[in-house]
Amino acid sequence: MSKGQKIGLTTLAIALLLLFIDPALSLVPFALFLLLLLAAPFMYRFGFFLPVISRGRSGRPIVALTFDDGPDPTTTPLLLERLAAHRAPATFFVTGRRAAAHPELIQAILAAGHTIGNHSYTHDTLVAFKGARRIFAEIAETQQLLTRLGVTPLLFRPPVGITYPALGKVLPRLDLTAVTFSCRARDGGNRAIARLSQRILGRVRADDIIMLHDSRPQRRAHLSHWLAEIDRILAGISQKGLAVRPLAELIGRPVDLRPGNGCASRAGRPPDSRP
């Protein structure tokens, strides 16, 4: 049972009790529950509609780096160089559309020892309003594409961390677990890179899952500044007494599967469209 279902049942019980005291008061819990329903999709750590992993549970001074929205032919290769220089592992939550356009970058990410997660096909932030079948297609198409490229993700990160009820039905059919984040810079997909390192280093804590982007900055002139900010983040994490470790180490489960280590081929089946 999800947190949302538990809260819904609690709301109903409170409303029934209040009904015997004052019928008007019984409407208050329902009103509060409705407000919570509206806010819950944007509460990326709450897991209201389905179980969500938002931070590690190792109990050690380690953090995980994750990069969303790639791969990008301009930024991803340069980022891989920086990660190699700092010996920092990362997880790349890639979109199917970009992976299809740049399969060589998927191979480069894997060859460098990093892991890959599913970030939907088109990164449509409004997909929640388009039905369970469309949601399934967005995720399953990316899953099938990446499997053909030699890696099967076990984790799905919803675009912008927004969750919604249909994910709770779709992800189990694809053997995927939802993972969000606990530390981000609100960089707008690298549209706001000024003081990026300060925003991360000012709030990062042990067991944090850090969310960044490897999409290119809006202006090519900002590329060198973005790379410098990444260097500052990687150096600053170490200076804070923390170590960058694989995401799998923080959450206690694998991030992806590859040929030779039990790679899954199940693509799942679309959810029933009937009410």
Image (cartoon, rainbow, N blue to C red):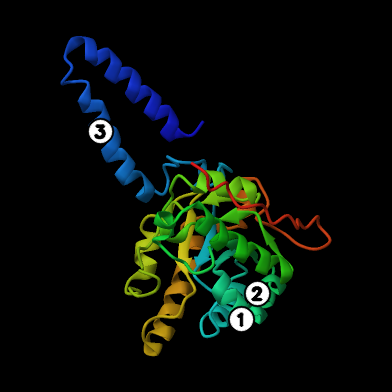
Q: Is residue 48 above or below residue 64?
A: above
* Label 3 with label 1: CB-CB less than 8 Å: no
Q: CA distance from mark 2 to mark 1?
A: 7 Å
Task: Report which quarter residue 29 is drawn in.
Answer: top left
Task: Report the residue marked by disc 2.
Answer: 106
x 40%, y 59%: residue: 184
x 39%, y 24%: residue: 9
- The type of residue carrying mark 2 is Ile
In terms of secondary structure, where does tag 1 sit?
loop
- The type of residue carrying mark 3 is Leu
Image position, residue 74 (x, y; %): 52, 85
Task: Report the residue marked by disc 1.
Answer: 102
Q: Going by the picture, which residue comes out furthest to the bottom? A: 221
Task: Report the residue marked by disc 3.
Answer: 32
Q: CA distance from mark 3 to mark 1?
A: 46 Å
Q: Going by the picture, which residue comes out furthest to the top? A: 20
Is 130 or 37 nearer to us in this picture?
130
Task: Report which quarter residue 26 is drawn in.
Answer: top left
Quick check: 25 left or right of 218?
Answer: left
In terms of secondary structure, where does tag 2 sit?
helix
In terms of secondary structure, where does tag 3 sit?
helix
Q: Is residue 157 visible?
A: no
x 65%, y 73%: residue: 109
- Neighbourhood count class around disc 2 (C-alpha, 10 Å): few under 14, some 14–19, many 20 upward: many
- The type of residue carrying mark 1 is His
* Label 2 with label 1: CB-CB less than 8 Å: yes
Image position, residue 80 (x, y; %): 59, 76
x 69%, y 68%: residue: 113
Lower sequence index among marks 2 and 3: 3
Q: CA distance from mark 2 to mark 3?
A: 45 Å
